[in-house]
Amino acid sequence: MRILLVSSGGGHLAQLLPLRPWWGKQERRWVSVRQSEVENTLSGESVVWAHFPTTRSVPNALRNLFLSWPTLRNFRPDILVSAGAGVSVPFFIMGKMLGIRTVYIECFDRITLPTLSGRICYPLSDVFCIQWEEQREFYPDALNIGPLL
């Protein structure tokens, strides 16, 4: 299986790391932002560097949308997985257009309010995962996978 893991840095990336027993056995590529913590964490991994900052930056969202086309077409993942944030949206849009299965994991620390990227990616997700039952208020069809951290 080919997996494209798409993530901003910090806690978003940290939430994908506990899934290593699954993704570590697969052919994979990452899309993330070039920050020293991300470079250190993903050292030795195949990484496509997204345009940063991603939070509410329309120009970078468009740049990342244009980045998503060659990334998805060249790697041809079977599944696209993300725990957010802003970098996930353009990749989910293009992934849906290309018929790639998508899995979104809503943030661990957003219990009482949904994230902007979660709200956008919810209708684009084949599987939308929550980590707390309280998040179901915003995502009624979500799968509760429990806390990853």
Image: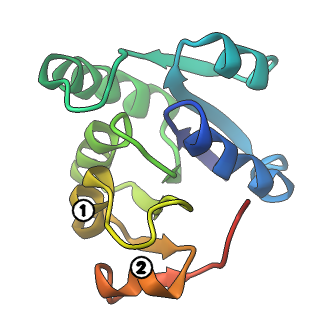
Tell me the amino acid under the disc marked 2.
Gln
Q: Residues within 10 Å of mark 2 (few under 14, many from 20)?
A: many
Instruction: Give the percent coordinates (x, y) of residue 21.
Output: 86, 57
Task: Give me the C-alpha separation between circle 2 and circle 1.
Answer: 11 Å
Instruction: Give the percent coordinates (x, y) of residue 25.
Output: 84, 50
Instruction: Give the percent coordinates (x, y) of residue 84.
Output: 44, 47
Q: Vertical placement of 81 versus 6: above or below?
A: below
Q: Vertical placement of 112 versus 144: above or below?
A: above
Q: Vertical placement of 118 versus 40: above or below?
A: below
Mark closest to the chain's N terminus, 2 or 1: 1
Write the residue at 61% across / 20% down.
47
Instruction: Give the percent coordinates (x, y) of residue 120.
Output: 22, 57
Of the 4 image quadrants, the one containing the C terminus is: bottom right
Closer to the camera: disc 2 or disc 1? 2
Residue denoted by label 2: 135
Residue denoted by label 1: 119
Q: Quadrant of residue 101?
A: bottom left
Say which mark, if any, is on residue 17: none
Write the residue at 78% across / 54% down.
18
